[in-house]
Structure formats: C-alpha cells, structure tokens
Amino acid sequence: MLISFYEEFPDENNLSKLKLIKFPTKLYIASKSVEEFNQIKSKIKSPYVKEIIYWPTLTKEEGYWLSPFSNRKAILRTISELKDSTIPVMWDSELPFRHPLLFFKEFPNFFRNKRLIKNFLEFYPKVYISESFSPSYLHEKLLRFLGISFKYSPNIYTIKMTYSSMHDFGKYLIEQQIIKGKNNYKNNFMLAFGVLTQGILGNEPAISTKLLERDLNLAKKHNLSEVVIFRLGGLSKKYLKILSQ
C-alpha cells in the first residue's frame, strides 16, 4: 500500500520532512497557481517521491476550497490555467465554511458553477478529488447534490477524508466506507488519514498513534492501493514508525 502525503504549506521547513521518508511516496502540494506549483516542484529532489500532484487553493475570500459556492471568477481562473494541461490535479472539494458569506453571494451561480466543475472533472486527464467522509447513503446523496462528491470515472481518483483526530467515525463505519468506496470507485478509491498537525483551520488536533495505526490496518485489511496522510509537516519519528511498518 502506497502511503502519500498532503502538504498544505509547502515551505522549506515542511518539505524538509522528506528526509525522513525512505519508502516510495507521492506528494499533494497546495499552491495558488500552476506557476507557483512548478516552482515548488522543481525544489523537491527526493528519489522516493514518485509523483507530485498540484493542489489548487483559493484565497479565503474566494472560498479557499473548491465547490459550486466558491467565487465563480476563481473557479474559472483555476480551470482556465489547466486548459490543455496534463499535470495531475487534486481537487479539494469542500464548502467555503471559512467565508460563509459566499453561500449567499454565489447562490445565484450555484447550478452553473456545479455544471462547470462537473464538466472539468469528467474530462481532465487525471484528477484526485478530496471529499468528505460519507457515513450514510443520504449523506452521500446530499454531497452529490451540493456538487462536492462525484460518480466514478476512469480519470478520477476519489479520496475520502477520514480524519479520526477530528471525528472518529469508528472501525465499523470506516470499514463500511471502504467497502462502499471500492464498490463505487473500483481501484480509484482512497482514504486520507490524520491529522498529524494543524492545517488552515489552525485548531485541528493531532491524531494519536493508536488511532493512526488502527486506520492504516483497516486500509491494509481491505487492500487499498493508496492512502494519503495529512500532512507532511507533522511527520515525526513516532508517526514514521507506524507508517513504515
């Protein structure tokens, strides 16, 4: 099972944690533009990094994450800069809770933004979509309606955010999510675990080694091909010991 990493703040200090990794991995690098991403990518020299994926983020006022409620101009900008590109992309599909006024401002654009995003994701060569954990059928239907969850497509890899330090869904629901995910998305299904350290919210609690080990064992039990850890900057010897098993 491949163990990959998100890095939301790819500065020198966080990327220096790559020195600890002695196994094949992938990186999902948050950047404001393709140009910024390429600059960061050029500085990553680890022989263990097999793929580097562009994770586009918006400003807080634009929504930061990408959804039909994000600022329309920002969505268009993000999609436009990827026109004719083959860079692998990670679409962070979350609602703009950091700037809730967007729910009102972008409501008139909701359906056309939803259609715009859907068309882009269906036809882009290779895209990873980071989605919310969906513990029930009704919750999954709601995510689909809101335009932040998507059906299977051969070019799309679905990553369900399963951050047990923030909300522990428990062994049963995580296993049900894996079984449902593998049925719906075949080998294009992944889970994201963590968190090892805080992200943009600034208040995310770090996962215990016990919970991280449990989550990884569930992924191995069900033969997931890849999991993603949030995030590289929180990697330490205690976490590395579990990830290297």
Image (cartoon, rainbow, N blue to C red):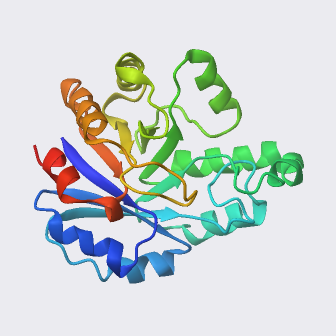
Using the rendered view, name the quadrant where residue 158 is placed: top left
Q: Quadrant of the image for the N terminus?
A: top left
Q: Quadrant of the image for the C terminus?
A: top left
Q: Is residue 168 left or right of residue 4?
A: right
| Picture residue at 71% right of the left edge, 44% below the top | 115
| Picture residue at 71% right of the left edge, 66% below the top | 74
Q: Position of residue 88 (x, y in %)?
A: 40, 60
Count of picture labels: 0
Q: Is residue 55 left or right of residue 103?
A: left
User: Is 217 rendered above or below residue 156?
Assistant: above
| Picture residue at 64% right of the left edge, 31% below the top | 144
Using the rendered view, name the quadrant where residue 170 is placed: top left
Front-most of 84 and 149?
A: 149
User: Is 73 rendered above or below residue 143?
Assistant: below
Q: Position of residue 109 (x, y in %)?
A: 84, 50
Front-most of 77 and 162?
A: 162
Q: Position of residue 227 (x, y in %)?
A: 30, 43
Q: Position of residue 113 (x, y in %)?
A: 75, 50
| Picture residue at 41% right of the left edge, 36% below the top | 164
User: Is 43 rendered above or below residue 172?
Assistant: below
Front-most of 148 and 126?
A: 148
Q: Is residue 215 left or right of residue 146?
A: left
